[in-house]
Image (cartoon, rainbow, N blue to C red):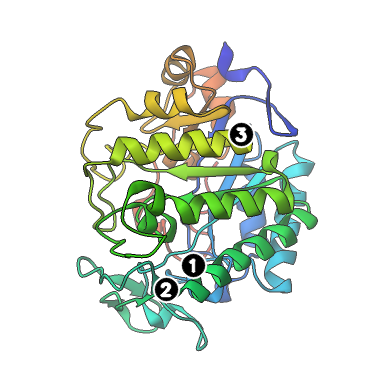
Amino acid sequence: MKTFEPTILGNRKLNNKIVMAPLTRCRAINNTPNELMKTYYTQRATAGLIISEGTSPSPNGLGYARMPGAYTDEQVQGWKSIAEGVHQEGGTFYIQLMHAGRVASQLNLPDDGRIISPSGVHLDSGEMYTDSKGFQPHDIPEEMTIEDIVATKEEFIKSAEKLIKAGVDGIELHAANGYLLEQFINPKTNLRTDKYGGNYKNRARFIIELAYELGRAIGNDKVGIRFSPYSVFNDMQGEYEDLIDIYTYLADELGSLGLAYVHIVDQTVAMNAPEFATDIKRTIKNAFEGTVIVGGNVHSTSQIENHLNEGYDLVYIGRPFISNPNLVEKLKTNGTLTQPDFETFYTADAIGYTDYI
């Protein structure tokens, strides 16, 4: 089966074509990766590639309670230990750098943190959980100045440089699910009239500049990116006039930079998102010169094989990895998958985290 054949991603050999998707788990007490998290990731290291949960490159990006960061020395040391654990089991480990942007409560940020977004568009649907006061409305973001844009790119680059130096294999830019990078892409959250707003090339500018500068800093073959076209998660606009144009443009530009991969999220099951209005995955695959990761509601080898036979390169699996640390072995042997406990997805301790077998 193609699923279990080794393959090359960037400068790394993967043991199989199964990707453990980024999964928010909220175990980073004081926003710092810890030994519990090391156990969790090491248990799942038989995946060909592990992509970490969203990790903030800056105090400004900490939208969620107990979201890990990668901007202090202590945080980077925590990630170094986790990467070492994954490597000892023969795995490959990328960290997803995620800036929450407007999807935030000030209560989840340190005193010097600021909630910023391309435009001051309030996320007025849903609420954000905080450890101190429970669920709270999202705070209104500040519109980013040009200085903020430059500083934010620098934060991503400094964080990535520290992580690569610490032994992490690569970085995924989180440009999906309604967070900061997608807030630049989407016309609902980007109302700017300068060079970072307006037409689709301008709305893509921040991501292309960031990817270019990040590739120069750590190597293009160590940079991937995640997209979620047609997503309405975090109150994004699912369809808009130039959606195909902007994702085709992004795929072409990022492919010309030699990025390691594009990771396309399908949220139709996990997040009750609408079906894709077009075959956007194929559009991106045709435009991008490099590895393309797809998936969504995958829980069997036959589903993985179907994606691979369609010409995609790697297949991500999300929630089954939560409750099946030995998922790769279960897929090989057609073993019965353990169902996850939704009540412990975002709690703070080992229960529902490292106690699955």
Kind of residue indicated by mark 2:
Met
Instruction: Indicate the quadrant where residue 340 lies.
Output: top left
Q: Which is closer to the viewer, label 2 or label 1?
A: 2
**Residue appearing at x 32%, y 69% in the figure:** 119
Per the image, the residue denoted by label 2 is: 144
Query: Looking at the image, is 241 positioned above or below residue 158?
Result: above
x and y percent of residue 191 in the render?
A: 28, 64
Q: Can residue 82 be seen in this view?
A: yes
Instruction: Indicate the quadrant where residue 134 lies.
Output: bottom left
x and y percent of residue 77 in the render?
A: 75, 65
Q: In which quarter of the image is the C terminus?
A: top right
Binning the other alpha carbons within 10 Å of mark 1 as few (below 14), some (14 to 19) or many (20 upward) gives: some
x and y percent of residue 219 in the render?
A: 72, 45
Q: Residue 348 carries which label?
A: 1
Q: Which is closer to the viewer, label 2 or label 3?
A: 2
- 47 vs 327, nearest the viewer: 47
